[in-house]
Amino acid sequence: MNAQPITISLHDASRGFDISPERVPLAVLSDFSRDVEELLRGDGKEVATAKLDVAIVKGSLAIQTSPISQPELVQDLLKLLASQLIDGLQAKRREVITRWQKLAKTSRDITINISSDLLPEAVIINFDSDYRSDDADQWARVERYLRGEIYDLGGKGVVNAHMLLPDGKTITVEAARDTIRADKVNRLYKPAMVRITAEYNVLTRAYRNAKLVEFVEYDSRLDEQAMTRLTERGAVAWKDVPNASEWVDGLRGGLV
């Protein structure tokens, strides 16, 4: 297999202008770059992403690799051309394609294109495509509290909150326009807690179709007075126990 470049491009005019390297929202650039890196690296980190080159393509944001010939990457791309059921892809690539398909379903003005001389034709993800996993039974409807940092909030069509979680992952949460309008707190680039509803994959622990219920006010600072009161109450409760660890072992069925 001869080494060839692979180009992944995002065509997006949903905001009223064509996204390009000359004009791109920071959150879009960050998310797209991360997704491209995950797609190329896969589960086994096949591609040295430090060698990526950015190509300027009119009307799009495009990232082009130096020539590569990793068989597993090419096999997964060929699978995308053969079927829109993506269960056979490596897990990381499956997650990326799922995110891109969800994004493309929000507007007919969004298309993601994967092209290379290694492929007989381009992989096209758009409003009309239907890349999906045949794993409906793995998803459960949940309500969760999430803590993190909101790094982008708003949108012209679909209103989203983009949130960086403590483990380094990000999640996009759809929000009602009235909820954002009524919120009087500047949430950007600050610790935040949100209550969401979402579908949760019990195998991959991924969220999808997340929707904001409310922002939750919380204070992460330690209340020293409250901690002191708890310590004092504990000391009183345990004053007649000569050896705390032996007492706990006894409760657990151990020998004292």
Image (cartoon, rainbow, N blue to C red):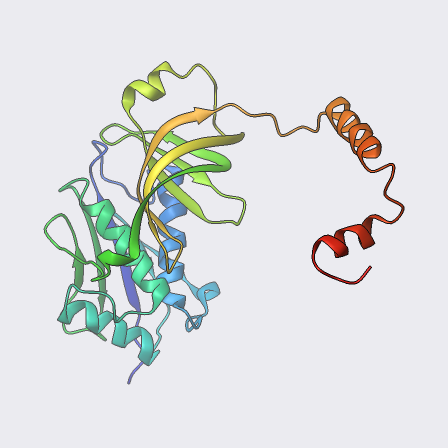
The spot of residue 66 in percent (x, y) is 37, 69
In this view, 155 is above or below 179: below
Q: How many marks?
A: 0
**Quadrant where the image shows the C terminus:** bottom right
The residue nearer to you, when weighing 189 against 7, is 189
Q: Is residue 58 visible from the viewing direction of this image? A: no
In this view, 31 is above or below 133: above
Left or right of residue 52: residue 131: left
- In the displayed orientation, state which residue is furthest to the left: 128
The residue nearer to you, when weighing 200 against 130, is 200
**Quadrant where the image shows the N terminus:** bottom left
The spot of residue 45 in percent (x, y) is 44, 70
- In the displayed orientation, state which residue is furthest to the bottom: 1
Left or right of residue 247: residue 36: left
Q: Is residue 92 visible from the viewing direction of this image? A: yes
Residue, x 79% and y 63% (percent of image)?
255
The quadrant holding residue 129 is: bottom left
Residue, x 32% and y 73% (percent of image)?
73
In this view, 163 is above or below 72: above
The spot of residue 117 in percent (x, y) is 21, 73
The spot of residue 223 in percent (x, y) is 71, 25
Residue, x 42% and y 73% (percent of image)?
46
Residue, x 36% and y 14% (percent of image)?
182
